[in-house]
């Protein structure tokens, strides 16, 4: 059996295949999840990685051995697993995927009833104990999967989120990164007036053209260049399992996730006046300022999809956005989607008859952000304590790491879940001030000789 204790992360299970996760490990995870949830009906879907079908089948074998009937959704974007579990009224399920990691990795994103995720705070530690303590057991040669093709229902669900026929025929370069988006995107956008220029729509789990992580400069370079060369109106990129999307404006510039959150909030509040919108504490003030200006209620939240989905379920939140490109929708069972944001942004551009750069101009002229900067430190608690002492004259909060607010600048520093790293996100009202305060905060973080 191979499932490394280190593969159990804060939000999922992920590691090298087969060194840290193999078929026997996947079988144990299936059995453990079924027992932990008391599940009678589970589902499994998978991304295009070459190892994913084997791991999905092994998960099903384990789940069936523990008494659950398993529905197989086949190769799907992760967001379709969430939809399938919630829409079909299942007790839970697993998406076999390593998301944006390179091809040699694999893993699982696990959910319970209503597609509520297991996390490091709720569910994954118990699952880890069950998996690692489980006795070996003989398993049947193959599971008795019930196949369910979600694509027709999910395409209808996505298109119901916008007025598809009212979309302007924008010319859009789309990069599927040889991932799961390559199957879903044509089914969705063929039903709209959008003119699609395709990059790497051939589904290939080796990811032969670039890593399926659009946040890497090397992964987004070709898309940015192609948007300019094609004189396109927009660029859209998805990660490997297509539950996140990223935007390139018509000038070839990358659009930060908090600016996307602000635009999505504005678009949704036009239809749902006064609604509550959730944003993560790394975001610039562009997000709460835009929400309030549009008549909504801005709610700050700690980072992580489990925390967003739990709070959205508790408090009836319309929409939530993270700077990492995860966007959550009440109308999508409170789950994240990489396709609903793409459709909503295209609808917003159509309604305003404006380009992305034009919509972003007021934000770019007002909010100056550092982006996330990682620093390796020898003593994480000591570095956080130094920050709190040095900036005690600001408004200090501890929702996730240390956040400090001043009238014209602010920052959050939060520790990594897996490494001795601190992650800085800082915003200010001018480029010069942003650079000055960024360097100041980094100097305090690195005072113990970190890097």
Image (cartoon, grey):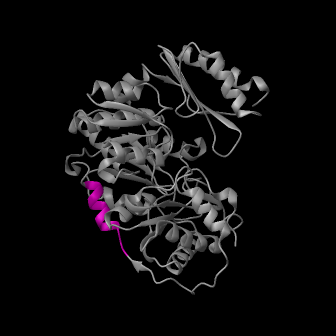
On whether residue 151 falls in the magenta region, the answer is yes
Would you say 230 lies left or right of 26 here? left
Query: Where residue 386 sits: x, y (%)?
Result: 69, 22
Would you say 134 lies left or right of 228 here? right
The quarter of the rendered structure image containing the N terminus is: bottom right
Q: Which residues are magenta?
A: 148-159
Would you say 160 lies left or right of 140 here? left
Taking 96 as reference, is 425 above or below it? above
Quarter of image, res 251: top left
Residue with the most extreme right position: 449
- Look at 58% across and 68% down and name the residue there: 29
Q: Main secondary structure of the magenta part?
A: helix
The quarter of the rendered structure image containing the C terminus is: top right
Would you say 4 lies left or right of 29 here? right
Query: Where residue 341 sits: x, y (%)?
Result: 36, 45
Give the total of numbered labels.
0
Taking 412 as reference, is 196 above or below it? below
Quarter of image, res 299: top left
Q: Is residue 71 visible?
A: yes
Query: Where residue 101 sits: x, y (%)?
Result: 60, 54
Quarter of image, res 19: bottom right
Given residues 354 and 16, the one toward you in this image is 16
- Look at 25% across and 44% down and name the residue there: 168
Query: Where residue 11 sits: x, y (%)?
Result: 55, 52
Given residues 114 and 367, the one toward you in this image is 114
On whether residue 394 falls in the magenta region, the answer is no
Residue with the most extreme bottom position: 141
- Look at 55% across and 34% down and name the residue there: 400
Q: Is residue 255 visible?
A: no
Given residues 397 and 428, the one toward you in this image is 397
- Look at 47% across and 66% down and name the residue there: 37
């Amino acid at each position: 059996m191979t499932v490394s204790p280190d593969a159990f992360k804060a939000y999922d299970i992920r590691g090298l295949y087969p060194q840290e996760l193999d078929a026997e490990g996947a079988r144990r995870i299936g059995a453990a999840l079924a027992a932990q949830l008391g599940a009678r009906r589970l589902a499994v879907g998978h991304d295009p990685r070459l190892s994913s079908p084997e791991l999905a089948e092994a998960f099903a074998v384990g789940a069936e051995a523990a008494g659950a009937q398993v529905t197989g959704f086949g190769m799907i974007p992760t967001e379709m697993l969430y939809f399938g579990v919630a829409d079909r009224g299942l007790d839970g399920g697993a998406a076999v995927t390593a998301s944006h990691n390179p091809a040699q990795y694999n893993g699982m994103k696990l959910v319970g009833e209503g597609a509520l995720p297991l996390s490091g705070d709720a569910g994954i530690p118990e699952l880890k104990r069950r998996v690692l303590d489980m006795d070996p057991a003989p398993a049947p040669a193959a599971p008795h999967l019930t196949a369910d093709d979600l694509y027709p229902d999910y395409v209808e669900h996505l298109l119901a989120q916008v007025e598809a026929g009212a979309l302007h025929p924008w010319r859009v370069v789309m990069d599927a990164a040889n991932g799961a988006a390559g199957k879903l995107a044509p089914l969705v956008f063929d039903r709209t007036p959008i003119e699609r220029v395709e990059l790497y729509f051939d589904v290939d789990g080796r990811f032969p053209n670039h890593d399926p992580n659009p946040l890497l400069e090397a992964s987004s370079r070709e898309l940015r260049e192609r948007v300019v060369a094609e004189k396109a109106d927009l660029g859209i990129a998805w990660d490997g399992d297509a539950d996140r999307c990223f935007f390139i404006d018509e000038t070839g510039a990358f659009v930060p996730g908090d600016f996307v959150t602000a635009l999505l909030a504005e678009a949704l509040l036009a239809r749902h006046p006064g609604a509550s919108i959730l944003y993560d504490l790394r975001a610039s003030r562009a997000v709460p300022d835009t929400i309030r200006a549009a008549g909504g209620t801005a709610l700050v939240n700690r980072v992580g999809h489990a925390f967003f989905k739990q709070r959205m379920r508790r408090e009836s939140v319309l929409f939530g956005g993270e700077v990492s490109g995860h966007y959550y929708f009440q109308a999508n069972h409170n789950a994240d989607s990489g396709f609903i944001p793409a459709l909503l942004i295209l609808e917003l551009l159509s309604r305003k008859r404006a380009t992305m750069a034009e919509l972003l101009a007021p934000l770019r002229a007002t909010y100056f952000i550092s982006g996330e900067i990682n620093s390796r430190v020898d003593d994480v608690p000591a570095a956080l304590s130094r920050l709190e002492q040095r900036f005690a004259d600001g408004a200090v909060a501890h929702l996730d790491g240390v956040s400090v607010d001043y009238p014209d600048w602010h920052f959050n520093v939060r520790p990594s879940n897996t490494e001795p790293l601190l992650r800085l996100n800082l915003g200010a009202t001018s480029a010069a001030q942003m650079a000055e305060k960024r360097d100041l905060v980094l100097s305090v973080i690195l005072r113990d000789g970190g890097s």
